[in-house]
Amino acid sequence: MPKPWFRLYRSMVDNAKAQALRPDLFKAWINILCCTDDEGNVPPIDVLCFKLRRTQPVVAKYISELSTLGFIVDNRAHDWSEHQYKSDVSTDRVKRFRERSTQRFSNADGNVPDTDTDSEEEKKRKVQKKKSAAQSRSATAQRWPSDAVVPDEWIADGLDARARNALPALDLRPEAEAFANYWASKSGKDATKLDWKRTWLNWCLNAKGKPHGTAKPTQLEQLAGIIRDDRGFDD
């Protein structure tokens, strides 16, 4: 029976966002990826404590920090579906290999069939992405809803965009609130946009907010500190 696995790209060594993690948090992130299921969902904290061989306060701190930095979004590894294609499933590759082998030996004229690669699924995905982009451009420009908030996934994408452009990491949560308030109150022809996510990403690239690490500790971080102090756990 094949063992479960996931893709880890060589380009990670050049990823500013990942390389900015301190050594123990980087190791924890890789180990947490090893603990996720096939959909990238992070298991419960008690399961992580056992697999990582760490105490609950330590693991809670890891989860909180990785969530704040955008590596974990809604208890799921960020951009899992974009990096882990369906073609990576071992049984699918074995099935295609058997089909190619059968066709090769059954061809009376000796023609060799086209080689199927894992990039086929990726090509289909890119075509669909282009179609979606075209549909988005043809859509009617809309205003930012007065009760809308910037999703956590967009905040993580904003961090990625800043990292790709070699910009310093910022706490984008205040920026998200400012973005929503600004566009909800703006009027006139400039208040409508075709692609609000792209507008948000441009906002992130121009943001001059507080550097990451100066924000008020989250409730989870505060709880982890209280537990650590009460029980006397060491990291």
Image (spheres, rainbow, N blue to C red):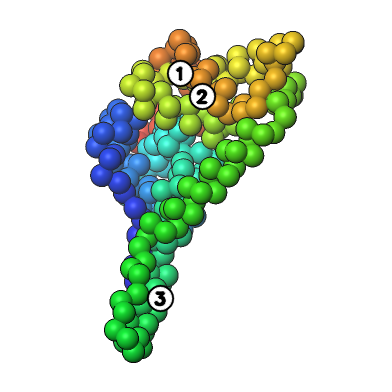
Between the residue at mark 2 and the residue at mark 1, the CA separation in whole angstroms equals: 6 Å
Q: Is residue 4 above or below residue 105?
A: above
Any part of residue 185 in sight: no
- For the N terminus, the image quarter is bottom left
Q: Give the crowd class for mark 3: few <14, some 14-19, many >=20 residues within 10 Å.
A: few
Any part of residue 38 in sight: yes
Between the residue at mark 3 and the residue at mark 2, the CA separation in whole angstroms equals: 41 Å
Say what secondary structure mark 3 lies in.
helix
Q: Is residue 217 left or right of residue 191?
A: left
State the residue position of label 3.
95
Residue ID at (58%, 29%): 197
Name the quadrant containing residue 15. top left
State the residue position of label 2.
201
Locate residue 205, reporting x and y percent.
45, 18
- Look at label 2 and name its amino acid: Leu
Say what secondary structure mark 2 lies in.
helix
